[in-house]
Amino acid sequence: MAGESSGKKCGDGDGKVAGKSQRKVGLVYDETMCKHDTPDGEVDVECPDRIRVIWKKLQLAGVTQRCVVLGGSKAEDKHLKLVHTKKHVNLVRSISTKRKDSRRNKIASQFNSIYLNGGSSEAAYLAAGSVVNVAEKVAEGELDCGFAIVRPPGHHAEADEAMGFCLFNNVAVAASYLLNERPDLGVKKILIVDWDIHHGNGTQKMFWKDPRVLIFSVHRYDDGSFYPFGDDGNYNMVGEGPGEGFNINVPWEQGGCGDADYFAAWDHILIPVTKEFNPDIILLSAGFDAAIGDPLGGCCVTPYGYSVMLKKLMEFAQGKIVLALEGGYNLESMAKSSLACVQVLLDDKPVQCSSGTYPLESTRHLIQAVRKRLCVYWPSLAEELSWKLVDQKTPTPVGHLSSCLPFPSSLFVGRESVVSGARTEGPNLTVLPSLEPRSTSHILPHSHLSVTKKRKAPASGSTSSRRFSELEDVIVEKVLPSFQEELTGMEFEDRIAFGKESSFKAIVMFDHLAQENRELRYKISAASDALMASNEKLKNLSAERNSADALLREVEELKSLLAARDGELEAKRKELKAKDKELEARLMLVGAREDEMRGLRAKIESLLRERNEGVAKAERLDKELQEDRPRSRLENDDTDMDSEDEDIETLSQKFKKDINLVFEKFRKDTELFIGELKKEREHAITAAVITTRYQVCRKWKSQGTLSGELKFAAEVYSKLRSLVEEHGKSHIYPCVEMYEEAWKEFVGPRHHPTVTVKT
Ligand code: Q9C
Ligand code: ZN
């Protein structure tokens, strides 16, 4: 069972290259695993040559001597039972004990895509055990990293189910072994990356609720119509219970994915999550059926692409990473990809990190969707994505592909990207294209290997189609004749081999062209996307500016409105102030009028009193007069009656006349006096008015327009003074006094009027 392992181990001393410490890379290869095969000699894509071709390629490249080569080791049942049922383990073990193929066929027929033969049990045990062994050595630190080139593959195998060429789930067994059987190694968190083109359904189920194992599987999903079918591979399958968020699926919507799509998934999903998860070790379900030219995968990841993806993962877990082969059915493509990976493990290759290709548009949407679904668990996925689309352009990595070209690249006119140095490998190389009917029609527009020149017209207007047809012209006119030359003199077997190799290389080349074509189309759509987006932005911007302008105008209007209001308000305030003043003046006037009225009433009262006194006096005098007359008549009768009577009569008449005269005079005097009083009243009224005016003027004194008023007031004052002189104190009208007092108080001391007072 040791295969080629014996005597091939490298000593520690070999691990030095140019003074630099060489990484210790473990490689498992064991011929025993080739014994698992179809029972009847039929050819299956999952054929023994798969691992042989890889091993040959590594040997030829001279890398096996620089690795620690390990033979296979059988898994222990108790380790297998960590993830599989007892029943399943027993079943797989029993396969080789069956004596007839028919018994095995019966078992196989119960499963999907499973064939069994006498060697199947041992191969299955070796595959699982070898992955466990390398993983253990890497975890211990005995190795830095490793690659288990094993078959049958494992990632489809479930706890109680073999399927999809898988019997035991090799990677799951190894992960479970480290976590549960070797706590001493301190492995607490394991990242399982599954880049096989098929969904790793078995691994997903086994760690569905286990947060210690983060699973990342990128695979074709095609809406559930790609193997292993169903919904399990969709991105909404994130795990459950404590394992929720620890299962990540990136399900491609269709075939044709290439380096750029995988890099996008790496850069925008896997790498940020791995940073957060910080695994202690990484196990890689390394199927190479997403590789360019694979008959099952229909994708076009290049060896370069694989090396970049691996390099990026080696940044974590201190570089502790174990690759376990899963699928991969184009032998040449798989072998090249495997070599590229081992070279990265050995740290031989400085790897560029930009491919110059562009992810599919659907990839962008898918990555957004996956990030959105998982960002609850991995905060770094919530960050805004930036797609550097059009600005990064580095040459397409045709270096790996140039060796796939069956003819000198100089035959291509106007193709800049093809490197010089054609046909790096001769026709003697063992190239074993799968005999399974290959379905490459998904990549190639038409039967490109047809020798006749008759073919479908290319889609008009499509540059890529034109390029294809030009290429076909080249093939027919130049390549085929050159083939003819080469073929002459060759043995039949060599001719067959040469033909096979050439056809494979042509397929690879056309795959690459198809990819380039897709990239071009994508670039155009990305550019037009960007243009549309920037147009939209421009529109939004101008709309925003317009609305801002409108807002500004509105503000301006409001401002002027406010100013107008302010003016109005100011005017109103002035008006109010004036009204206030007027009111004050009116109030003062009213006060003065009231005073005046009081004065008038008092005067009328005093006049009435005076009149009554006058009337009473007159009546008393009248009475006195009538009493005096009889008395004097009696005195006359006593002495000289006749003459006395006569005298009394004349005297009486004379007295009567006198009285009348006196009365008349009194009446006239009274009338005169009343007239005077009336005049005086008028004066008083005038004085009151003047007083009021004066008081008003007094308020205006600050304005300096008082002189006229003062003059007038002085005149009135002098009139009043003369009235006072004429009629005496008893006739002083109260207003005059008030006026005088006011005069003295306010005007007198300051501007005494020149008043001439009659004495
Ligand atoms: N014509 C792995 O890659 N489909 N398994 C079979 C054959 C099953 C793939 C169709 C594919 C299983 C490990
Ligand atoms: Zn696969």
Image (cartoon, grey):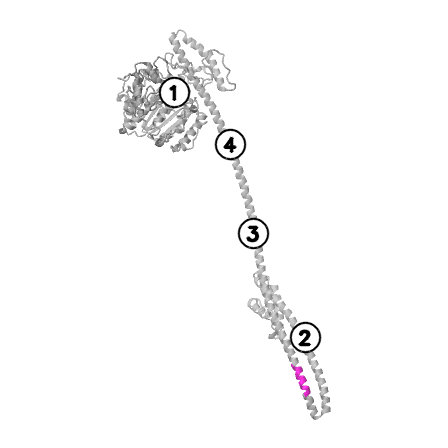
Q: Mark 4 highlights which residue?
A: 536
First in sequence, mark 3 or 2: give its number: 3
Amino acid carrying mark 1 in the image? Asp
Q: Nearer the viewer, mark 4 or mark 1?
A: 1
Distance Cα–Cα, label 2 vs label 1? 147 Å
First in sequence, mark 4 or 2: give its number: 4
Q: Mark 3 highlights which residue?
A: 569
First in sequence, mark 4 or 3: give its number: 4
Distance Cα–Cα, label 4 vs label 2? 109 Å
Q: Mark 1 highlights which residue?
A: 289
Residue 100 can be seen, yes or no = yes
Query: Magenta segment, which residues?
Result: 620-630
Distance Cα–Cα, label 3 vs label 1? 86 Å
Q: Secondary structure at mark 2?
A: helix
Amino acid carrying mark 4 in the image? Glu
Distance from mark 1 CB to nearest ligand 2 atom below 8 Å = yes
Distance from mark 3 CB to nearest ligand 2 atom below 8 Å = no
First in sequence, mark 3 or 1: give its number: 1
Residue 671: mark in rendering: 2
Task: Give yes or no for contact between labels 2 and 1 (Cβ–Cβ under 8 Å).
Answer: no
Q: Residue furthest bottom?
A: 639
